[in-house]
Image (cartoon, rainbow, N blue to C red):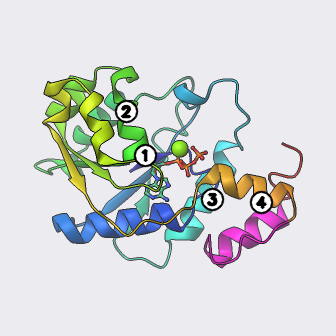
Amino acid sequence: MGGTFDPVHYGHLRAADEAHAAFGLSEVIFVPTGQPPHKAGEMVSSAEDRYMMTVLATVDCPYFSVSRLEIDKTGKSYTIDTLKQLKSMPEYFDTEFYFITGLDAVLDIVSWKNPEEIMSLCKFVAVSRHGYTRSKMDELPEDLRSAIIPLEIPLLAISSTGLRERVRKERSIRFLVPPSVEHFIRKNSLYKDI
Ligand code: ATP
Ligand code: MG
């Protein structure tokens, strides 16, 4: 599961857990993006802070892990390159990959690098997300749309954008992110002056 995770929240964690259960996955790897190609120019917390929060949020779940693949890369990160890199690792020889996204992200897929190739290398899952209806997928080209596996999950209307806004306005983010992530944000004064 790729993402900016700025910050990681219960929407991400629930989506990952739902996919884990629905497809009988052995592991969910969270891959915080380095320099997100879609967010150029926008304010993004440091890769290390986003990595740290993702580790804190996932540490007590035995089948969740976090990869440094993208954050250790200089320059832009593309899903296709990360996927190929993961698939070439000896521990993932013979592993079937599922790429987990929300319905909002999947609608952008036409703008990604080599979407058809991504689809050919993994199963592509689109979990439901508050504010997006599945019929939006009809706008995607047929070859991409037919390869996407939709997964209905309980909707949690949580977004990192909303959380950053809450912190900036000094509103509570309790019960929207794990306590450790909330403490990390406060301790490091993240999202104060965006
Ligand atoms: P931002 O508001 O900064 O874009 P975000 O909350 O969308 O943040 P991302 O890091 O952009 O979080 O998302 C990573 C992945 O998790 C994307 O595929 C996104 O669709 C999915 N996702 C994020 N929040 C939810 C949620 N509440 N429910 C389901 N999927 C989600
Ligand atoms: Mg997003």
Residues drawn in magenta: 171-188
Report helix, strand or loop for mark 2. helix
In the rendered structure, the answer to whether residue 6 lies left or right of residue 105 reads: right
Q: Name the residue under label 1.
A: 2
**Quadrant of the image containing the C terminus:** top right
Q: Where is residue 191 in the image (x, y as percent from the top left)?
A: 80, 51
In this view, the residue farthest toward the left is: 94
Q: Mark 2 points at which residue?
A: 79
Dots 1, 2 in contact, CB < 8 A: yes
Q: Within the magenta stretch, is there residue 20?
A: no
Could you tell which of marks 3 and 2 lies nearer the N-terminus? 3
Residue receiving disc 4: 166
Q: Mark 3 points at which residue?
A: 52
Query: Label 4 vs label 3: CA separation?
Result: 20 Å
Residue drawn where x is 33% and y is 38% of the image: 136
Question: Looking at the image, how many numbered discs can be counted on the residues?
Answer: 4
Q: Which amino acid does label 3 sit on?
A: Met
> Which mark sits nearer the N-terminus, 2 or 4?
2
Which amino acid type corresponds to the residue marked 2 in the rendered image?
Thr
Question: Would you call the spot at circle 1 few (<14 residues within 10 Å), some (14-19), or many (20 or more)?
Answer: some
